[in-house]
């Protein structure tokens, strides 16, 4: 009876040991593919290379946090989530930064997202993004951050017409439209009201300057 018990213990230990070896050390359950989800402009191969996971590395021992950190080293990415998909796939779901404006920078153009993170530096300004002019184009500058908030708040029907945004101060944001008209937006406060009023005025009122900085007292020139 004792011999049988000992045999069962040894058999169980052997099975557990083999299973542990298969999961944690063997290439049998290693990484055979890396699935990239959510990327539109950043090539999948670039993300895989940045992830730094070798083929057949045991899936169970992949440092998910480490992979996420390395992938977020790609400045075009705002977020990343890494998961194991058994038996052999590493899934990386990314969120790309969305360009919202272009800032002139020494003869070149910095494409930035809503948080003022530089996505890329181009030799020519992308035609569909507004040109943003501020005195101190540095992340965290109040005027810059206010201008980016305003750009995000402009109604969808008006946004394609915005060609240039100026912000001397956080409370002094103005928009230049493609047809030559100007909008005095003011600060980033009460964005929904300002956007709704502006969209309505542009449709029914002919003017050169639309001042919606105070939604309660709108003026036209």
Image: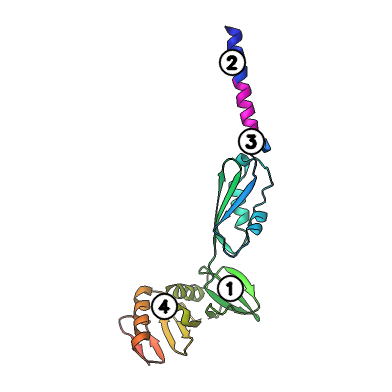
Q: Position of residue 16 (x, y in %)?
A: 60, 26
Mark number, residue 8: 2
Q: Position of residue 202 (x, y in %)?
A: 38, 85
The residue nearer to you, when weighing 199 against 182, is 199
The disc, 1 or 4, on the residue closer to the chain's N-terminal end is 1
- Give the Cα distance between marks 2 and 1: 66 Å
Q: Position of residue 29 (x, y in %)?
A: 63, 38
The C terminus lies in quadrant: bottom left
Please rate how many residues cluster around mark 4, counting C-alpha atoms within 10 Å: few if below 14, some from 14 to 19, many from 20. few
Determine the secondary structure under disc 4.
loop
Select label 4 or label 3 by which is in front: 4
The disc, 4 or 2, on the residue closer to the chain's N-terminal end is 2
Q: Identify the residue position indicated by label 3 in the image.
A: 24
Picture residue at 50% right of the left edge, 69% below the top: 114
The disc, 2 or 1, on the residue closer to the chain's N-terminal end is 2
The residue nearer to you, when weighing 39 against 218, is 39
Residue extending furthest left?
Answer: 216
Q: Identify the residue position indicated by label 4 in the image.
A: 157
Q: Are marks 2 and 1 in contact (CB under 8 Å)?
A: no
- Give the Cα distance between marks 4 and 2: 74 Å
- Give the Cα distance between marks 4 and 3: 55 Å
- Give the Cα distance between marks 2 and 3: 24 Å
Select label 1 or label 3 by which is in front: 3
**Magenta-drawn segment:** 12-24
Please rate how many residues cluster around mark 1, counting C-alpha atoms within 10 Å: few if below 14, some from 14 to 19, many from 20. many
The N terminus lies in quadrant: top right
Q: Position of residue 182 (x, y in %)?
A: 44, 87
The disc, 4 or 3, on the residue closer to the chain's N-terminal end is 3
- Left or right of 208, for residue 52: right
Above or below, 139 against 158 in this view is above
């Amino acid at each position: 009876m004792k011999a049988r018990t000992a045999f069962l213990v040894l058999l169980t230990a052997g099975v557990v040991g083999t299973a542990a070896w298969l999961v944690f050390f063997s290439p049998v359950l290693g990484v055979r593919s890396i699935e990239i989800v959510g990327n539109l402009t950043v090539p999948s191969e670039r993300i895989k290379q940045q992830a730094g996971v070798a083929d057949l590395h045991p899936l169970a021992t992949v440092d998910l946090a480490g992979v996420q950190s390395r992938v977020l080293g790609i400045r075009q990415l705002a977020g990343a989530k890494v998961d194991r998909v058994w038996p052999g796939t590493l899934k990386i779901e990314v969120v790309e930064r969305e360009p919202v404006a272009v800032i002139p920078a020494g003869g070149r153009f910095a494409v930035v997202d809503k948080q003022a993170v530089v996505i890329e530096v181009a030799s020519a300004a992308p035609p569909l993004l507004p040109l943003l002019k501020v005195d101190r184009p540095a992340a965290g500058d109040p005027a810059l951050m206010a201008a980016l908030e305003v750009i995000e708040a402009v109604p969808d029907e008006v946004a394609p017409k915005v060609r240039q945004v100026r912000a001397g101060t956080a409370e002094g944001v103005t928009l230049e439209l493609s047809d030559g008209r100007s909008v005095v937006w003011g600060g980033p406060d009460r964005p929904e009201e300002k956007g709704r009023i502006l969209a309505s005025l542009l449709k029914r009122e002919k003017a050169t300057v639309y001042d919606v900085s105070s939604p309660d007292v709108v003026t036209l020139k």
